[in-house]
């Protein structure tokens, strides 16, 4: 994928996230690597992003085909997480790229939008005639806003928590950003797929975003650029550039495909489960681990979550089980699947018959790619939350069949389990007798088994739910109790690694004949 985008760095700070409101890691310091800068022919400084800790390679398959999940000591339950970071453009840089974009003028905004669309259609008349000019509507009406906040379903989204006070403007911006990111990745994925949407050599597709901000669109292109430079190599053969002359945020996508590079790369697996089978496997895991073992105090059902937070005005809502059959060779399609599900969750609201409390999205083609799933994929998802301006709305959490606990030597990013040293500290404080019996490898296993699911899973939760749960629970006691339940000897009330392993393997192969 030859994506060329110029950007300026902005350090991304994502909100903390948890397992069904149970696992917020806050203990490690970020190990950032400064970006390398070059100067393009027009004098604009470009950011070439590189990965911390290990050198980059040209393709995702080269980086992650050997997917070991063990630390330098050989423990299969802990590892040093390479630190990935995507430098998102500053507002100043975005304004430079989209210099002529202006906001709507109150009651006249509809008229202005019509004039702006006409201007863009004249500028790209050929693309408009050929159906390659797309207007993406990111505007959010009052009913959508009220439903997303829970007002139409009777659920009150605000609480006594200081961080829970999210303004309507933040909601509107975040929802518009989610609409933009979902459609951005779907368009990129459709172009990349071998179908009628694929661009021919020297063709271009023009996308104008109605209601999104220049900063949101610039940051989406930053993420796409990072994907190209660090992950995909020459597979999509696209060039994406903002058009700063247009009156609304507009990007131009051009094909760089040639006869030599036009063969698509696809993911195949004869054992790929159906969406129904994947859902049933994940539900079985939810019942076994989260409910029966009480690993999550806020999940009492495999269909609804968020129980026990009503005094914070947090309603229970349904768990949305979702599915993506995309794999490492088509990460744009995975991103589209994820963000479309997140948008649906945000707009559905938190409660009522249609409200969604959390998402569990299974992506089975990443089951053997833990380092890819937990590193670059989740880095892109975290950056997407920031790019969309959706931090006040949602957070993302990582699960995987081979999940490993951070060993404490590096910062894994948000959405991951606490480190082994932090878990050991809590065990020493809360359960010193058992802590004296458990090796660091068993402490790591106690963390990892809280995140080991039948398939690679993206868990999405609401930001206010996470905040309320964090204020309610006592993390040291909860994690110490969970480690005892999972990995202690039978005489100490534990299940043990052998039983956990056999249970997970049984779930991973269940329902195959459905």
Image (tube, rainbow, N blue to C red):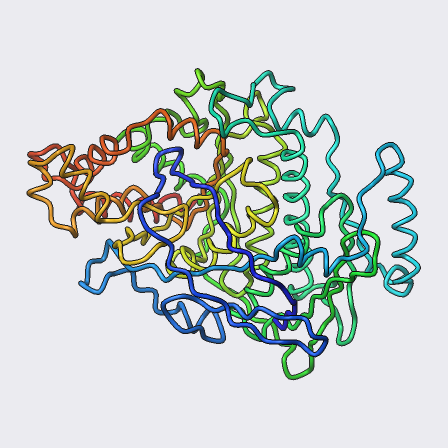
Q: Give the quadrant of the N terminus.
A: bottom right
How many dots with numbers?
A: 0
Could you say where residue 38 lies in the image, as x and y percent from the top left? Answer: 59, 75
- Horizontal side of 51 relative to 233 (left or right) equals left
Q: Nearer the viewer, residue 425 or 381?
A: 425
Residue at figure coordinates x 30%, y 35% from the top left: 289
Q: Please tell me in which quadrant of the rendered image residue 89 appears.
A: bottom right
In this rendering, is residue 93 above or below 183? Answer: below
- Horizontal side of 21 relative to 353 (left or right) equals left
Q: Nearer the viewer, residue 308 or 322?
A: 308
In this rendering, is residue 218 above or below 492? Answer: below
- Whether residue 95 is visible, yes or no, is yes
Could you say where residue 233 lies in the image, as x and y percent from the top left? Answer: 55, 73
Q: Give the quadrant of the C terminus.
A: top left
Residue at figure coordinates x 49%, y 73% from the top left: 59
Could you say where residue 403 lies in the image, as x and y percent from the top left? Answer: 32, 52
Q: Nearer the viewer, residue 343 or 176?
A: 176
- Horizontal side of 279 relative to 473 (left or right) equals right
Could you say where residue 183 lies in the image, as x and y percent from the top left? Answer: 68, 50
- Whether residue 368 is visible, yes or no, is no
Q: Nearer the viewer, residue 339 or 158?
A: 158
In this rendering, is residue 149 above or below 55? Answer: above
């Amino acid at each position: 994928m030859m994506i060329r985008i110029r950007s300026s760095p902005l350090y991304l700070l994502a909100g903390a996230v948890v397992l069904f409101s149970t696992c917020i890691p806050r203990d490690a310091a970020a190990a950032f690597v400064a970006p390398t800068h070059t100067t393009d022919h027009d004098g604009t400084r470009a950011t070439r992003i590189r990965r911390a800790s290990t050198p980059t390679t040209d393709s995702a398959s080269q980086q992650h085909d050997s997917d070991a999940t063990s630390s330098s000591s050989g423990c299969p339950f802990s590892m040093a997480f390479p630190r990935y970071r995507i430098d998102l453009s500053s507002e100043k840089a975005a304004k430079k790229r989209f210099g002529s974009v202006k906001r709507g003028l109150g009651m006249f905004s509809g008229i202005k939008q019509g004039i702006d669309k006409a201007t863009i259609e004249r500028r790209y008349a050929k693309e408009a005639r050929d159906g390659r000019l797309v207007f993406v509507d990111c505007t959010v009406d009052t009913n959508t806003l009220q439903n997303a906040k829970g007002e139409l379903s009777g659920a009150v989204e605000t609480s006594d928590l200081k961080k829970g006070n999210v303004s309507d403007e933040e909601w509107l911006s975040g929802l518009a950003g989610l609409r933009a990111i979902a459609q951005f990745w779907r368009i990129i994925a459709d172009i990349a797929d071998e179908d009628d949407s694929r661009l021919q050599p020297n063709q271009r597709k023009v996308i104008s975003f109605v209601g999104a901000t220049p900063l949101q669109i610039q940051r989406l292109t930053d993420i796409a650029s990072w994907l190209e430079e660090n992950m995909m190599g020459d597979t999509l053969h696209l060039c994406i550039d903002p058009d700063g002359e247009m009156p609304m945020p507009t990007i131009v996508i051009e094909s760089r495909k040639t006869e030599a590079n036009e063969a698509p790369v696809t993911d195949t697996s004869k054992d790929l489960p159906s969406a129904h089978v994947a859902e049933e496997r994940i539900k079985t895991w939810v019942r076994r681990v989260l409910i029966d073992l009480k690993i999550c105090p806020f999940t009492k059902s495999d269909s609804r979550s968020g129980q026990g937070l009503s005094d914070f005005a947090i309603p229970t809502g349904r768990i949305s089980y979702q599915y993506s059959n995309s794999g490492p060779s088509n990460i744009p399609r995975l991103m589209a699947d994820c963000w479309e599900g997140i948008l649906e969750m945000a707009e559905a609201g938190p409660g009522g018959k249609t409200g969604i409390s959390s998402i569990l999205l299974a992506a089975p083609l990443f089951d053997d790619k833990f380092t890819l799933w937990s590193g670059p994929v989740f880095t892109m998802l975290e950056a997407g939350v920031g790019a969309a301006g959706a931090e006040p709305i949602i957070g993302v959490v990582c699960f995987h069949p081979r999940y490993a606990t951070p060993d404490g030597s590096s910062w894994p990013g948000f959405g991951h389990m606490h480190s082994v040293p932090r878990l050991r500290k809590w065990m020493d404080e809360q359960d010193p007798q058992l802590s004296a019996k458990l090796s660091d490898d068993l402490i790591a296993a106690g963390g990892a088994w809280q995140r080991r699911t039948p398939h690679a899973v993206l868990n999405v939760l609401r930001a206010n739910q996470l905040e309320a749960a964090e204020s309610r629970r006592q993390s040291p006691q909860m994690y110490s109790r969970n480690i005892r339940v999972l990995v202690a000897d039978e005489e100490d009330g534990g299940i043990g690694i052998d039983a956990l392993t056999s249970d997970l393997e049984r779930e991973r192969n269940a329902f195959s004949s459905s």
